[in-house]
Amino acid sequence: MTASFVNNQNQDLSKVNYPILIEEKEGAYTATVWGLPECKSEAQTREEAIQNLYEIVNTRLQNVEIVMAEIEASHKQNPWIEFAGMYEDNPLFNEVISNIAAYRREIDNQIDSEGDV
């Protein structure tokens, strides 16, 4: 996995959108910035909780810099891919598939008959 900083002068990072989780419990509201659990506010009204959170976030971000980092995920092969098709030449494979399908129909019929009760 590699990471590099994106140096794109065209991006305006002066405004960043953050999702806010708002919870109502026992007549009070809690507002939390999703992904920043330390940015949390509690108040009697929803609007007051959001306003308090806005002030907390502005204070938190006052002396920070936001940069964009591009992270390239590793391109590892799925570990199960080596097993794909391993039974294609097995003469019993079709019989096994038929047995699985018959068992599935049997279970479905049992479920259907229990639902009719």
Image: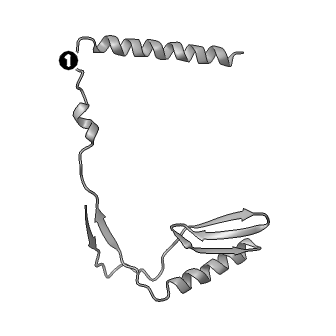
Residue farthest along the front direction in this orientation: 38
Q: 82 or 67, which is in the foreground?
A: 82
Give percent across and percent down for residue 7: 28, 79
Q: 23 or 14, which is in the foreground?
A: 23
Asked if residue 61 lies left or right of residue 29, the reply is left
Q: Which residue is mark 1?
A: 89
Residue farthest along the left direction in this orientation: 89
Q: Taking 39 as reference, is 73 above or below it?
A: above
Asked if residue 31 lies left or right of residue 98, the reply is right
Give percent across and percent down for residue 107: 53, 16
Residue farthest along the right direction in this orientation: 27
Asked if residue 63 lies left or right of residue 26, the reply is left
Q: Residues within 10 Å of mark 1 (few under 14, many from 20)?
A: few
Q: 30 or 12, which is in the foreground?
A: 30
Q: How is the image coloured?
A: one colour
Total numbered badges shown on the rendered structure: 1
Q: Which quadrant holds residue 77?
A: top left
Q: Which residue is located at x 66 percent, y 79 percent?
A: 51
**Screen quadrant of the C terminus:** top right
Asked if residue 42 lies left or right of residue 108, the reply is right
Q: Which residue is located at x 60 percent, y 80 percent?
A: 54
Give percent across and percent down for residue 1: 25, 61
Q: Which residue is located at x 50 percent, y 14 percent?
A: 105
Give percent across and percent down for residue 102: 45, 12
Q: Which residue is located at x 60 percent, y 70 percent?
A: 32
SS under mark 1: loop
Residue type at tag 1? Asp
